[in-house]
Image: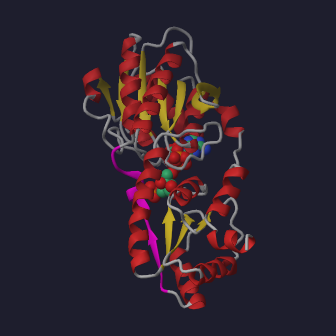
Amino acid sequence: MAGKIQTIGVLTSGGDAPGMNAAIRAVVRKSMNHGIKVKGIKKGYLGLLNEEIFDMVPKSVSDTLQRGGTILGTARCLEFKEEAVQKEAAAICKKHGIDGLVVIGGDGSYRGAQALARHGVNTIALPGTIDLDIACTEYTIGFDTAINTAMEAIDKVRDTSSSHERCSIIEVMGRNAGYIALWCGVASGAEDILIPEKYDFNEQTIINNIIANRKIGKTHHLIINAEGIGHSTSMARRIEAATGIETRATILGYMQRGGSPTCKDRYYASIMGSYAADIISEGKSNRCVCYRGGKFCDLDIEEALAMTKEIDPYQYEMSRLLSRSEKIEQDHK
Ligand code: ADP
Ligand code: F6P
């Protein structure tokens, strides 16, 4: 879009994530510092289509930094995948004088931002998802809070699991990605960590591991199961039948997405929001803000969406070794 950016919109889209408010706050305050007006858009692309648009001032974001969720609300809006709807949204932006838009969400939301850029709205996307599943960035807003929330919950389940000498399967979120499971599994000393990127669906290996652990006197057996594998309840039934050890499934669910953001999420989200305000004021469009190799940077959304990322093989092997005390003992007898 030619000419200086005068007014931008900001919206959150897809699943909410702790730290989104810190990002919104930074977008609002830094943009206004650049002399750019900011409009808040409620409920993601759905709210844009319904013209739920309001003026924001620095005070609009007071007392929000420490709050979980998103003050703008969020939504999934499937019709936004349609070209005609995207065109209509761009026309709504024009009608409200919005010539730039900051979108905070996951990679689905990035595609919406890309579409709006094609229709002449300068867009910048920020990675807002607890899943850490955006390939172009090593940090996503909300992941740190979610793993800490899940880890604390897992520690609690571990206490009762040990007291009752039970096996526990704890299912964590992450959609098709295993990052939450991997991090929480290692951090809580789980005996088995099942992630969609690596799981071979061989339950017998897990059963053998549970029996071996019981033989060396372990009172609990924690299995962290990623949402992408799922079926924790039926898995618990089969494991109990095969081992004779009481087995319970706990699905942590949405509690992982809520709560006050950690210091890291507040700090990184603030940097990313500020960075977005800077590059949108320079007239950049169709870019996403990333954290790569210890630095914040921006990439073309097209290029970013074409990237893939894998679970780090060293970290995965480490997670397997550290959880297998009975195997280490056998190997070194
Ligand atoms: P996330 O942004 O967390 O990945 P979704 O995949 O549900 O979550 O995407 C959030 C929203 O982004 C969708 O509800 C839709 O409005 C928009 N979106 C997703 N995919 C596309 C697409 N291919 N084109 C345009 N908009 C999309
Ligand atoms: O993307 C975040 C996430 O919480 C995923 O971990 C999960 O699969 C999904 O959102 C759940 O989405 P919804 O809120 O639509 O049930």
Q: Classify 189 as above or below 60.
A: below
Q: Which residues are magenta?
A: 246-260
The residue lying furthest to the front in this view is 333
Residue 247: say if magenta: yes
Rendering coords of residue 140 (x, y %): 53, 40
Numbered-mark total: 0
Q: Is residue 81 left or right of residue 163?
A: right
Rendering coords of residue 269 (x, y %): 45, 33
Rendering coords of residue 112 (x, y %): 55, 38
The residue lying at 54 percent from left, 50 percent from top is 131
Image quarter hosting the N terminus: top right
Image quarter hosting the C terminus: bottom right
Rendering coords of residue 222 (x, y %): 52, 71
The residue lying at 57 percent from left, 37 percent from top is 110
Between 90 and 180, the one nearer to me in the picture: 180
* Residue 79 visible here: no
Q: Is residue 311 left or right of residue 185?
A: right
The residue lying at 64 percent from left, 31 percent from top is 293
Between 13 and 51, the one nearer to me in the picture: 13
Quadrant for ligand 1?
top right
Q: Classify 234 as above or below 82.
A: below
The quarter of the picture where residue 223 lies is bottom right
Between 231 and 15, the one nearer to me in the picture: 231
The residue lying at 36 percent from left, 25 percent from top is 39
Residue 158: say if magenta: no
Colour mode of the rendering: secondary structure
* Residue 283 visible here: yes
